[in-house]
Image (cartoon, grey):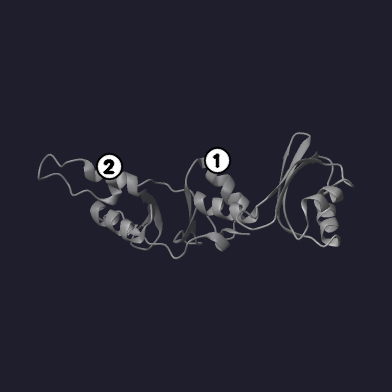
């Protein structure tokens, strides 16, 4: 999967001179937490979030000659960006490395065409792991050098079952594997796994 498969598009934008109050009202109406800031040519120059705007607007103007608060006063620049062709794992790594909650997706001319957030990645992880779908959730451990996932999936298929989702994480010398299996009973799955070098942690419904 790629960023283009998950990003929200099109994006709502503001300019640096947009009034902070107007920008915040627009964000609340659209139920969004952040918006990209663009120049007159539509190129990305920054990003602003609702919390920064609220803080800015909560500060009372001491004199009537004080400037009207604008997006420019609290926008973040430069912005961490990605392309629509970036694999999702690359985008996830960028979010974690830069400790940001969203990546702006830009085209070749640095114009924002989408946005992908950490919540989008949580949602796809939820779906990839089969959460919320009926079936047996099988948690097991295997030596890291033992490439058995395809063989286990094939054995489940031959037995009349279906692997609806799977995931694996390897730490040092051990791989933790999660499968969501349908159409087999818990005992059938346990019997099937006896033919493989695995340690079953748990098999639960749901």
What is the spatial separation of the Cα atoms under label 2 and label 1, in whole angstroms?
27 Å
Question: Which residue is label 2 attached to?
Answer: 55
Q: Secondary structure at mark 2?
A: helix
Q: Position of residue 19 (x, y in %)?
A: 24, 54
Report the quarter where the N terminus lies.
Answer: bottom right
Q: Does 140 sit above or below residue 43?
A: above
Please identify the residue farthest to the left as the structure is shown. 64
Residue mark closest to the camera, 2 vs 1: 2
**179 to the left or right of 76:** right
Q: How many marks?
A: 2
Residue located at (10% from left, 41% from top): 63
Q: Residues within 10 Å of mark 2 (few under 14, many from 20)?
A: few
Q: Earlier in the sequence, mark 2 or mark 1?
A: 2
- Residue labelled with disc 1: 97
Q: Position of residue 98 (x, y in %)?
A: 51, 41
Q: Nearer the viewer, residue 138 or 114?
A: 138
Judging depth in this view, the residue of 6 and 178 nearest the camera is 178
Vertical order, 24 against 65 (above or below): below
As helix, strand or loop, the secondary structure at mark 1 comes to helix
Residue lying farthest right? 195
Q: Which mark is residue 154?
A: none
In the rendered image, residue 162, in percent from the top left (x then y), is placed at 76, 61
Question: Which residue corresponds to the image point at 23% horizontal and 46% vertical from the top-left?
Answer: 57
Along the horizontal axis of the image, is 55 left or right of 84? left
Residue 10 percent location from the top left of the image:
44, 65
**Badge 1 density bin: few <14, some 14–19, many ≥20, Cα 10 Å:** few
Question: In the picture provided, is 199 more to the left or to the right than 86?
Answer: right
Task: Say if mark 2 contacts mark 1, CB within 8 Å.
Answer: no
């Amino acid at each position: 999967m790629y960023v283009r498969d998950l990003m929200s598009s099109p994006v709502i934008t503001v300019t640096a001179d947009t009034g902070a109050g107007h920008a915040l009202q627009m964000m609340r109406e659209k139920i969004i937490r952040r918006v990209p800031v663009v120049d007159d040519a539509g190129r990305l120059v920054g990003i602003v979030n609702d919390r920064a705007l609220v803080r800015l607007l909560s500060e009372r103007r001491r004199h009537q000659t004080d400037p009207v608060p604008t997006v420019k006063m609290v926008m973040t620049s430069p912005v961490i960006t990605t392309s629509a062709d970036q694999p999702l794992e690359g985008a996830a790594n960028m979010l974690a490395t830069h400790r940001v909650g969203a990546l702006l997706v830009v085209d070749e001319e640095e114009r924002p065409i989408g946005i992908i957030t950490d919540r989008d990645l949580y949602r796809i992880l939820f779906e990839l792991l089969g959460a919320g779908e009926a079936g047996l959730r099988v948690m097991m451990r295997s030596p890291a050098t033992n490439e058995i996932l395809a063989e286990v999936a094939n054995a489940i298929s031959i037995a009349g079952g279906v692997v609806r989702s799977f995931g694996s994480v390897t730490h040092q010398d051990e791989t933790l594997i999660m499968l969501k299996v349908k159409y087999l009973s818990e005992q059938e799955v346990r019997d099937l796994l006896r033919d493989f070098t695995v340690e079953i942690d748990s098999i639960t419904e749901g």
